[in-house]
Image: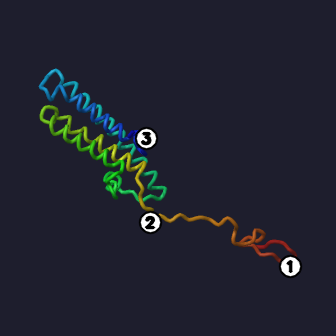
Amino acid sequence: MEADRPGGRIIVASWVSNALFALGSVPTMIGLSAGDAISAGVCLALFAISLLVWVWAFAVAASRSSDGDDIAVGSLFLVQGRLAGTARTPLYASFGLSVLITAITAASNPFAVLVPMLSLGFVGLWGARHASFGRRTDLRIESRPLRPTRPMGQRRGFERGADGRARQ
């Protein structure tokens, strides 16, 4: 089952969004003018969800990038590396189906062109959460030693005289 894979819920959500898109576009595809408002509402709702998914994907990617992963926008959404047999294959297939539905319905419902952003956002979210990226080479983490390098009894700026008192 898809939901058992890493990121499986993201994959399922991408396919469910395409099913909602297709069902919401049926009235427009068969020529019912009464369904125009429903189709437009479904498309706008899915686009609004896509904005949240994109923000979520960028927030996760920024968090991983600050932890040292080398994530760029291109590598996040195109998720570089081998494609066959990975979880990205169904995500790209879902994106392709979304573009196909858009191509069929865009003439009768102009809001349909916004919906593929959701499928592409799910690709980015999966990439931000589950893809493996190299380490950043420009990030240098400085650490202090656990033990001080000079004795604790001596302080800089003070000298001890013959009588044992500290002098500046």
Task: Identify the secondary structure beneath mark 2.
Answer: loop
Residue at (23% x, 39% y) in the render = 114
Judge the density around disc 3: few (<14), some (14-19), many (≥20) Cα neighbours within 10 Å: few
Look at mark 1 in the image and give the residue it sits on. 162
Residue named by callout 3: 4
* Label 1 crowd (10 A; few <14 / some 14-19 / many >=20): few
Q: At which x and y percent is residue 84?
A: 31, 53
Which amino acid type is marked by label 1? Ala
Decide which of tag 3 and tag 2 comes sooner along the chain. 3
Q: Upstream in the sequence, badge 1 or badge 2?
A: 2
**Of the two numbered discs 3 and 2 in the rendering, the one whose residue sits closer to the viewer:** 3
Coloring scheme used:
rainbow
Which numbered mark, 1 or 3, is in the foreground of this view? 3
* Up/down of 154 relative to 2, above or below: below
Query: 137 or 77: which is nearer to us?
Result: 77
Whole-Å distance between the Cαs marked 1 and 3?
76 Å
Is 152 in front, or is 19?
A: 19
Considering only vertical position in the picture, is 41 above or below 9? above
Q: Residue 59, image x and y in percent?
A: 42, 47
Which amino acid type is shown beneath numbered disc 3? Asp
Q: Residue at x 19, y 40 (%)?
A: 100
In the shown orientation, is residue 104 left or right of residue 50?
Answer: left
Residue bearing mark 2 = 138
State which quarter of the image contains the C terminus: bottom right
Going by the numbered disc 2, the residue's amino acid type is Asp
- Dot 1 falls on a residue whose secondary structure is loop
Q: Quadrant of residue 36?
A: top left
Q: Is residue 24 left or right of residue 160?
A: left
